Image: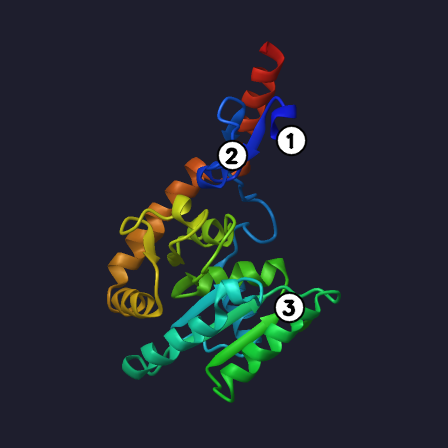
């Protein structure tokens, strides 16, 4: 089937493994739009106002994961990480944000499971688009978060990582899929493969503000070079040129 096409595009190189399309395949990574509601610059007072409106204490640190309520995104594992970190950092808060669809019964079931797992902890906040959390609000939460987590067990590309890196946040991501392309371990974030490893990295970053800032600077630079729509457009121009020549 693949051989019928002149070019086959993959978002991550490992997704092409095992497919016999070496001669007509290429890698084009997804990208973020820096001028969209989710990624445009926001003044600090606007960020604070938005986050505070949802009841999060902006004077205290918080961990953030933005993803679907899905077992592969492991929000329950993130709650476990938060609870263990909270033993040593009692001021820490956790914010989980996900977008829900009315025609996704499985998503709603896992969302409800996440709420039950969070229990009555007043420092855990679970928000969806039905709570008024849209692109602008996600932007603000990503900019305000102390540490952003993307603890995926399996992942396609995971552009929420680039969204957070663009906002100069320190990011801890699951060592899977496109997250490995966006995070260079120890330079602009950490790659993790377990809850214990995630806890260790969260604690390290909470204790080291300079490291968080360094990761943020490095992450912003990586996204500017590799994961913006300008690079994406250039990749497609090169693709169209190669097709025209061939």
Nearest the viewer among 202 and 39 is: 202
Q: Which residue is mark 3?
A: 107
- Residue 198 appears in the figure: yes
**Residue 68: which disc?**
none
Mark 2 and mark 3 in contact? Answer it, CB < 8 Å. Answer: no
Q: Which residue is mark 1?
A: 1
Eyeballing the image, is 238 above or below 246? below
Nearest the viewer among 64 and 7 is: 7
Task: Name the residue: 42% across, 52% down.
Answer: 176
- Residue 45 appears in the figure: no
- Report whether 158 appears left or right of 107: left
Q: Residues within 10 Å of mark 2 (few under 14, many from 20)?
A: few
Q: CA distance from mark 1 to mark 2?
A: 11 Å
Residue that protrudes farthest toward the right in the picture: 103
Q: Quadrant of the N terminus?
A: top right
Eyeballing the image, is 194 above or below 183? below
Is label 1 or label 3 in front?
A: 1
Q: Residues within 10 Å of mark 3 (few under 14, many from 20)?
A: some
Task: Name the residue: 57% across, 43% down.
Answer: 33
Is label 2 or label 3 in front?
A: 2
Q: Secondary structure at mark 1?
A: loop
Task: Name the residue: 27% across, 63% down.
Answer: 209
Eyeballing the image, is 42 above or below 225? below
The mark nearer the N terminus, 1 or 3, is 1
Residue 67 image point, x, y percent: 54, 62
Q: Secondary structure at mark 3?
A: helix
Residue 163 image point, x, y percent: 49, 51
Residue 13 image point, x, y percent: 45, 37
**Residue 19: which disc?**
2
The mark nearer the N terminus, 2 or 3, is 2
């Amino acid at each position: 089937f693949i051989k019928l096409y002149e070019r086959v595009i993959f978002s991550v190189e490992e997704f092409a493994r095992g497919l016999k399309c070496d001669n007509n395949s290429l890698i084009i990574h997804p990208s973020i739009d820096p001028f969209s509601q989710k990624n445009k610059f926001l003044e600090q007072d606007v960020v604070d106002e938005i986050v505070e409106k949802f009841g999060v204490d902006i004077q205290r640190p918080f961990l953030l994961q933005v993803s679907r309520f899905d077992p592969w995104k492991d929000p329950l594992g993130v709650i476990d990480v938060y609870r263990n970190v909270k033993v040593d950092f009692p001021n820490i808060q956790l914010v989980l944000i996900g977008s829900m669809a009315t025609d996704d019964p499985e998503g709603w079931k896992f969302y409800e499971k996440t709420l039950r797992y969070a229990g009555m902890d007043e420092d855990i906040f679970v928000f969806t688009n039905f709570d008024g959390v849209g692109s602008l609000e996600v932007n603000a939460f990503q900019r305000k978060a102390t540490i952003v987590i993307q603890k995926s067990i399996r992942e396609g590309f995971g552009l929420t990582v680039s969204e957070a890196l663009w906002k100069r946040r320190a990011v801890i991501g699951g060592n899977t899929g496109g997250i490995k392309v966006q995070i260079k371990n120890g330079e602009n974030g950490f790659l993790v493969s377990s809850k214990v490893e995630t806890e260790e990295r969260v604690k390290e970053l909470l204790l080291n503000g300079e490291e968080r800032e360094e990761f943020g600077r490095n992450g912003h630079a990586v996204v500017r070079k590799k994961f913006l729509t300008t690079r994406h457009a250039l990749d497609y121009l090169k693709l169209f040129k190669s097709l025209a020549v061939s």
